[in-house]
Image (cartoon, rainbow, N blue to C red):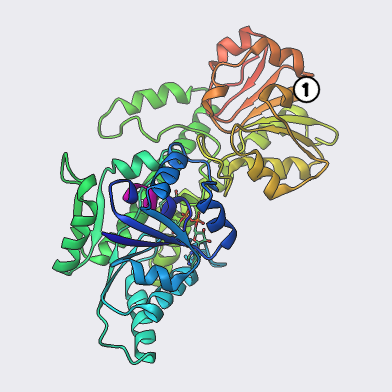
Amino acid sequence: MNVTIFGTGYVGLVQGAILADVGHHVVCVDVDADKVERLKKGIIPIYEPGLESLVKENHAAGRLDFTTDAAEGVKHGEVQFIAVGTPPDEDGSADLKYVLAVAETIAQHMESHRIVVDKSTVPVGTADKVRAKMMEVLASRGREDLGFDVVSNPEFLKEGSAVADCQKPDRIIIGTESEDTEEAMRELYAPFNRNRNKIMVMDVRSAELTKYAANCMLATKISFMNEIANLAERLGADVELVRQGIGSDPRIGYHFIYPGVGYGGSCFPKDVQALIRTAGDIDYDAKVLKAVEARNYEQKTTLFQKMRTHFGDDLAGKTFAIWGLSFKPNTDDMREAPSRVLMEALWEAGAKVQAYDPEAMEEAQRIYGTRDELTLCGTKEAALKGADALVIVTEWQSFRAPDFDLIKQKLSEPTIFDGRNMFEPKRMAKKGFTYYSVGRSTQG
Ligand code: NAD
């Protein structure tokens, strides 16, 4: 099939690549001319395992192309995906200006029937807004005769495993009430629906809400577990034992119950906020979601609080080694990352940071530029040199078994603040470290 995708971010680019890889002909449109030029040359703007080769191969095979020319994009695809950003507005609601701009563009240029697929995460009722915007533009062109359908097809990929998630999705949600559109979407996704039926067809509003419900449920699990961790710490219990104890119940399960320094990224924070806002708009007080957000906000300061307890309020003149800047492993994404809250608090308190991340160094440079308080180091070992403590913020695989002797040797004081519970507290004490983690008593 001929497919057009508006937006070449995490969602649009990955979707474009995997659809082209099974044989569809895909044109990706983006307003960012630089990005489009780089993509044409095979330069991938984000770090995502497996993506680069997929993009290069399919581009070379002529099944995946990139353009800034919206008219060309609209002409190409019978299916038009909207995969642009929906950042939080000032009041926390999802800002739909990019989504509606694409709807307008499609209506401006279409000359025959189009299926408009909303893949961006958008509040319930957005498909109606997209439809209204398109009808308005078609009316202004005097082309009300042109038919179209708006489908909700939310994306559930996880950054860091986006390609694999899209190639082997847990489910494919299709929100439409039109049989023809359902059939076209089934054909589009047939290559990903071979072993068991993953396609779930539902009404548009339910599809839109499913995406928010999924992300809010996951965020709730994290905030809940962080609450238990904070309690464990104060009650003399070990949250890691509690985690295993509750995870063994299949109704709870082991997934997503790791305590830590709070969730970040481009999705959970904004989607929880947006659903709270949606609830507010219909005079419903989303009490659970508000608590999830409040817990997360505080949790991001947990390492800073522990550092202040250890070193005293005055951190001026101190230097800290930070391992992990991305909001989670296997991505270079630092949007809403707990590392940012921590670093900014440390700078505010007069401390300096020597940071290392396996993938997010360029992104950190882009965000913070050159400044005295931040040294970006080429290796995790270099970040340790002369620092007053090591602080682990992201649980990258390469941090799991470090050379502890070297850490001790390089730090001016053998102290570790571990926001991801990567090590065993008693073992760390035996090695001579003062070891702080989350939801467990401090050792050493
Ligand atoms: P992103 O910010 O990485 O990319 C968005 C892209 O859209 C940018 O390249 C931007 O230049 C482009 N764009 C903006 N306006 C445009 C226009 N009018 N025409 C063409 N391109 C335009 O965003 P993302 O992370 O890919 O997220 C996209 C949507 O998918 C959001 O609603 C997000 O909530 C949702 N989502 C994201 C993830 C994720 O893990 N990142 C997962 C599931 C769903």
Position of residue 282 measured from the top left corner of the image (x, y, whole percent): 37, 72
Q: Is residue 34 visible?
A: yes
Q: Main secondary structure of the magenta part?
A: helix
Instruction: Report whether 117 appears left or right of 13.
Output: left
Q: Which residue is mark 1?
A: 385
| Secondary structure of the residue carrying numbered label 1 | loop
Position of residue 134 measured from the top left corner of the image (x, y, whole percent): 36, 80
The C terminus sits in image quarter: top right
Residue at the far top: name it. 430
Q: Is residue 16 magenta?
A: yes
Give the residues in magenta: 15-19
Residue at 30% from the left image edge and 25% from the top image edge: 248
Residue situated in front as seen by the camera: 263 or 378: 378
Report if the beta carbon of the residue with label 1 is closer than 8 angstroms to ligand 1. Answer: no
Q: Quadrant of residue 211?
A: bottom left
Q: Is residue 206 magenta?
A: no
Q: Is residue 126 visible?
A: no
Residue at the far right: name it. 317
Residue at the far left: name it. 179
Instruction: Report whether 88 appears left or right of 374.
Output: left
Residue at 25% from the left image edge and 79% from the top image edge: 147
Position of residue 304 measured from the top left corner of the image (x, y, whole percent): 67, 37
The N terminus sits in image quarter: bottom left
Q: Is residue 246 above or below residue 305?
A: above
Amino acid of disc 1: Lys
The crowding category of the residue bearing disc 1, from other C-alpha atoms within 10 Å (few below 14, some 14 to 19, many at least 20), is many
Position of residue 336 measured from the top left corner of the image (x, y, whole percent): 57, 49
